[in-house]
Image (cartoon, rainbow, N blue to C red):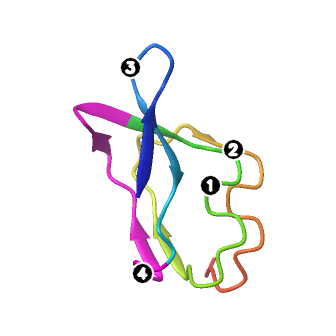
Amino acid sequence: MYYELSEDGSYAIVTGYDEMETDFVVIAATHDGVPVKEIQASAFAGSTSLEQAVLPDTITTIGENAFDGCKRLMA
């Protein structure tokens, strides 16, 4: 999983993941001591292997098209 800190450093943003790692991802509730609150736009877009994603309740924003084209992703 790839993360970056928000501009003010108060929370983390999921920016993507290594598609070769797995077809199942669990997004952590915290990263480097701060809550994970956002999934960046297009973070997982176009993934051909992603089937499941578990999101923590800390997520408050899911960017536009974050999971666009993830044809194997189960609802």
What amino acid type should be assigned to the residue bearing mark 4?
Thr
The residue under the point 47% across, 68% down is 18
Q: Quadrant of residue 30?
A: top left
Q: Which one is closest to the eye, mark 4 or mark 2?
A: 4
Of badges 1 and 2, nearer the viewer stands 1
Is-magenta flag for residue 11? no
Position of the C terminus, as image quadrant, is bottom right
Q: Name the residue beneath numbered marker 2.
A: 63
Q: Does the magenta stretch include residue 31?
A: yes
Name the secondary structure under disc 4.
loop
What are the residue bounds of the magenta stretch?
A: 20-35
Q: Position of 40 compared to 5: left or right? A: right
Say which label, 1 or 2, has the lower sequence index: 1
What residue do we see at 77% from left, 73% from top? 69
Q: Position of residue 28 (x, y in %)?
A: 32, 52
Q: Residue at x 49, y 69 (%)?
A: 53
The 10 Å Cα crowd at callout 2, few under 14, some 14 to 19, many 20 or more, is some
- Circle 1 packing at 10 Å, graded few (<14), some (14-19), many (20+), is many
- Mark 4 crowdedness (10 Å alpha carbons): few <14, some 14-19, many ≥20: few
- For badge 3, the amino acid type reads Ser
- Distance Cα–Cα, label 4 vs label 2: 22 Å
The disc placed on residue 22 is 4
| Amino acid at circle 2 | Gly
Where residue 23 is drawn, which disc sits there? Answer: none
